[in-house]
């Protein structure tokens, strides 16, 4: 088994390699003046199982093309099996586009795709969950009066799994867009409770900010957010820090997460490393 990393999140790739007690393969990834990507593999991969580590962020489309070319080069160099390990899988919010990305990766030579907390479970690729990672952190930080909150109907299953693992109540919010996000109804009493909102992606932050406002109005004691992929477009960080959210915990699935001042960052290196081991 060999590991090779793209340029999107090298720090996480190194952590995964460290967990697996492996070294990352030597690869030369360059760009021509016009932006074309040129990749040269520096090691023999003939008849090897190769795991390609690449999140699709930042510069989503560049990261995707780099992954496609890297996979194709590995295939041309005789790799026996190629697994694309994509901690953050962009385009997952659009099912047709997510499926198209699968087709592109397959055409480039990828045999299997492994990702983390995929937004759309209907895409049909292997998905690891952060449930245990978040549960352990929650048990350390919060001792009583905790409820798990799904900010919308789409995240109920994810939130339910965490609530069951912690043996606490699940609260669901009914969210609509008119045209901005607006929370209409909370399906349980949250007065005096520490509400832990769980989601897979935070982009603009509007959904989480709206959920926090609704929970606070309903009498929640504190609002804490656990989200896997910190996209945080535009002024999302400032908006979140000025909101009713007391803290946000995220992971290092996306490069730059570790530099988010005031946010709690958990590493997914062990989860992904375990997922790779399970596929061997």
Image (cartoon, rainbow, N blue to C red):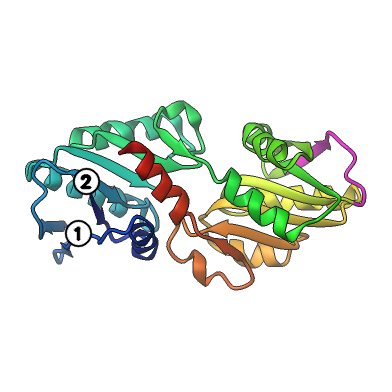
Screen quadrant of the C terminus? top left
Q: Distance between the residues labelled 2 and 1?
A: 10 Å
Number of marks in the rendered image: 2
Find residue 154 and report its horizontal and vertical position in percent: 62, 33
Residue drawn at the location 25% of the way across and 61% of the way down: 23
Q: Do callouts 2 and 1 mark residues in contact (Cβ within 8 Å)?
A: yes
Q: In this view, does 27 lie above or below 87?
A: below
Name the residue beneath numbered marker 1.
25
Sequence order check, earlier mark of 2 and 1:
1
Residue 259, visible in the rendered structure: yes
Kindly state the secondary structure of the residue where label 2 is placed: strand
Name the residue beneath numbered marker 2.
50
Alpha-carbon neighbours of circle 1 within 10 Å: few (<14), some, or many (≥20)?
some
First to last magenta residue range: 182-192
Find residue 15 and report its horizontal and vertical position in percent: 39, 62
Kindly state the secondary structure of the residue where label 1 is placed: loop
Query: Left or right: where does residue 191 sit relative to residue 171?
Result: right
Residue 202 in magenta?
Answer: no
């Amino acid at each position: 088994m060999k590991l090779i990393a793209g340029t999107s999140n090298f720090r996480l790739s190194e952590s995964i390699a460290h967990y697996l007690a492996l070294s990352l393969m030597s690869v030369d990834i360059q760009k021509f003046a016009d932006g074309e990507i040129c990749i040269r593999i520096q090691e023999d991969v003939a008849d090897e199982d190769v795991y390609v580590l690449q999140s699709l962020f930042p510069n989503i489309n560049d990261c995707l093309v780099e992954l496609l070319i890297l996979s194709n080069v590995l295939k041309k160099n005789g790799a026996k099996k190629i697994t694309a390990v994509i901690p953050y899988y962009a385009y997952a919010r659009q099912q047709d586009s997510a499926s198209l990305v699968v087709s592109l990766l397959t055409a480039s030579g990828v045999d299997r795709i492994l990702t983390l907390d995929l937004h759309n479970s209907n895409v049909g690729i292997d998905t690891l969950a952060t449930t245990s990672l978040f549960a352990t952190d929650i048990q350390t930080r919060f001792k009583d009066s905790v409820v798990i909150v799904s900010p919308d109907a789409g995240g109920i299953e994810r939130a339910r799994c965490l609530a069951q693992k912690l043996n606490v109540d699940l609260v669901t919010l009914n969210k609509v867009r008119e045209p901005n996000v607006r929370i209409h109804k909370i399906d349980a009493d949250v007065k005096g409770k520490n509400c832990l909102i769980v989601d897979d992606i935070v982009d603009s932050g509007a959904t989480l900010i709206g959920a926090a406002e609704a929970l606070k109005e309903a009498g929640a004691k504190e609002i804490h957010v656990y989200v896997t992929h910190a996209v945080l477009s535009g002024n999302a960080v400032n908006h979140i820090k000025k909101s009713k959210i007391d803290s946000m915990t995220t992971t290092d699935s996306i490069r730059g997460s570790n530099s988010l001042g005031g946010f709690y960052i958990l590493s997914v290196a062990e989860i992904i490393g375990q997922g790779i081991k399970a596929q061997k």
